Image: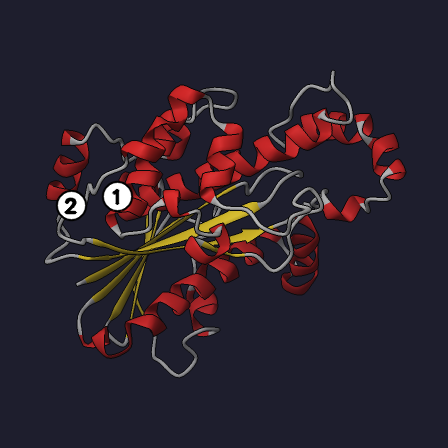
Amino acid sequence: MYIIGTDEAGYGPNLGPLVITATLWKMPSFDFSSVILSAKVAGVDIGDSKQLYHSGGSLLKLSKGVLSALASIDILPQTDTKLFNVVGKISQLPFMFVDNEFSLQKLCSSNLKNSEAKPISDSHKIFPNKELQIVRSRIIFPAEYNAMLDEFGSKGELLSNVTLGLVVELIEELGNNLCEQVLVLCDKHGGRNCYVDLLSGYFCDELIGVKEQSRKISVYNLCGIEFRFIAKGESQIPIALSSMFSKYIRELLMQRFNSFWKSHLPNIKPTAGYPEDAKRFIAEIADILSDLKIDKNEIWRLK
């Protein structure tokens, strides 16, 4: 069977990107005990990114999980593969990436402490049976985010539609393999319990069967594909790894973001981008924004 897990990082902040990731797995059954054991033996944690990383702390646990997972699907950061070719699609790079290019290797080497960068060279395959097949992330910077907000009407609809777009992309890549069972696992999108309208927008020709709609879980069947939207979904390995990728990518980008502004204002306190502190930060860089002729829309998310 094929299992797709999705999760995001950066849904709440006003500064920095929203990152949404989908991971695709091929498993003999819905039993991840061998995957958990393999990761444990390798000393790699796979879990809720909010438990593995706290703002201002070490990225080591996220780094080990993400880079080891990439090694397992034969994508090694040592090859300096561009990030948007490895795990993302970026329609517009932010102003601080003047070289118009960045990669996991560049982000890691420029942002991580030496002790945290060690997994880059020590990464090894924690999924020897190729259980993990594809990792795909969507990185949405503020200017694009604001445009999408106008299109979808709310940040909740934006999150749901981008997530389903990633899922559909992976399902289409399965092609003839769709004869096998496909299970899609998503962390619940805010307080939303009903996803029929969302699914019908992407699978309009299919009859959607509603199995359950509750605060705990919402389950749907359509044409052999089962969708589960789960509260606290990070307890499921496919969602947890997607959470880790999203958080890791966002945190590396936020470190790059803070470094850019610190180069202009050496005493500025770094920000994680969340609303109250974001207001402080945007006020402190207001003059620099003007001097550099940077449109606030390029860095400030409206919601």
Is 297 situated left or right of 112 in this image? right
Dot 1 lies on which element? helix
Label 1 or label 2, whichever comes before in sequence order: 2
In which quadrant of the rendered image does the C terminus lie? top right
Q: Secondary structure at mark 2?
A: loop
Where residue 29 appears, as percent x and y from the top left, is 11, 56
Q: Image quadrant of residue 205?
A: bottom left
Q: Is residue 104 left or right of residue 99?
A: left
* Residues marked 1 and 2 touching at CB (< 8 Å): yes
Nearest the viewer among 274 and 91 is 91
Task: Please name the residue that numbered disc 2 is placed on.
Answer: 32
Q: Which residue is mark 1?
A: 237
Query: Camera-side residue: 83 or 40?
Result: 83
Give, as a three-letter code, the residue at label 2.
Phe
What residue lies at 84% left-to-right and 32% top-to-bottom?
Answer: 288
Question: Residue at the spot x=54%, y=51% of the render?
Answer: 139
Residue 61 lies left or right of residue 12; in this view the side is left
